[in-house]
Amino acid sequence: VPPIYVTGSVSLVHATFARFLDEEMPGNPVIPAALAAWNKVLAMHQHLMLLGYHRARAVDAGDFAVSVRFFGRLRTLAEAPGMTLHLRDGAPMTDALRKLFNYHPQLRTAVFTCEWSDGVRFDRAGTPWFEAVPVYRVKPMWRVLLNGKDISYLDGPATMVTPGDEIHIFPPGR
């Protein structure tokens, strides 16, 4: 499905709304203001829909498939026992987790705590700019396993994922 279907659907909603307004209130001077307001709302919805579209498409982009299994309350939050992600060759666990939590953002706060790290980036002129970067860490007692081994005992999030690997995420108490 091409992304134009997402933008096209929002355009159709906007055009239909404009037609309804014109049919119900022909020549009414309030129509341009109403359309301007709805244009802002629909533009925001279009942005969110495209973001979701690209996140969903990213799950299927890659060189090989990896199975991800959820346990405990994650199954309820994800409304599924697991899913399949596609990763590029040489991808670290960070890429797999990023794809997973971009697809299921409601799981991110259940599994991770967010800490902010400061950094500096330089623009083209060499001017330094302060930059706050979110750093996600697995909450205490949660376990992220790669082929049955806790990644904290391997190379952490830098652990490489290879074809045929399985990722299991367990909540505390399991």
Image (tube, helix red, strand yellow):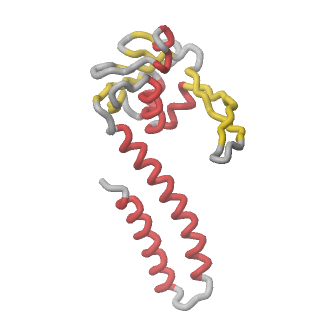
Image spot of residue 49 (x, y percent): 45, 54
Going 36% across and 24% down the picture, which residue do you hit?
90
| Above or below for 54 versus 109 | below
Q: Toward the viewer: 37 or 147?
A: 147
Image spot of residue 92 (x, y percent): 42, 23
Q: Toward the viewer: 173 or 137?
A: 137
Image spot of residue 82 (x, y percent): 36, 28
| Above or below for 35 versus 68 | below
Q: Is residue 90 left or right of residue 26?
A: left
Residue 117 image-quadrant placement: top right
Q: Furthest residue to the bottom?
A: 27
Going 39% across and 16% down the picture, which residue do you hit?
146
Going 49% across and 85% down the picture, which residue do you hit?
22
Image spot of residue 88 (x, y percent): 34, 31
Q: Toward the viewer: 125 or 72?
A: 125
Going 43% across and 34% down the picture, which residue do you hit?
99
Q: Toward the viewer: 15 or 28?
A: 15
Total of numbered circles in the picture?
Answer: 0
Residue 160 image-quadrant placement: top left
| Above or below for 166 versus 101 | above
Q: Is residue 129 left or right of residue 26?
A: right
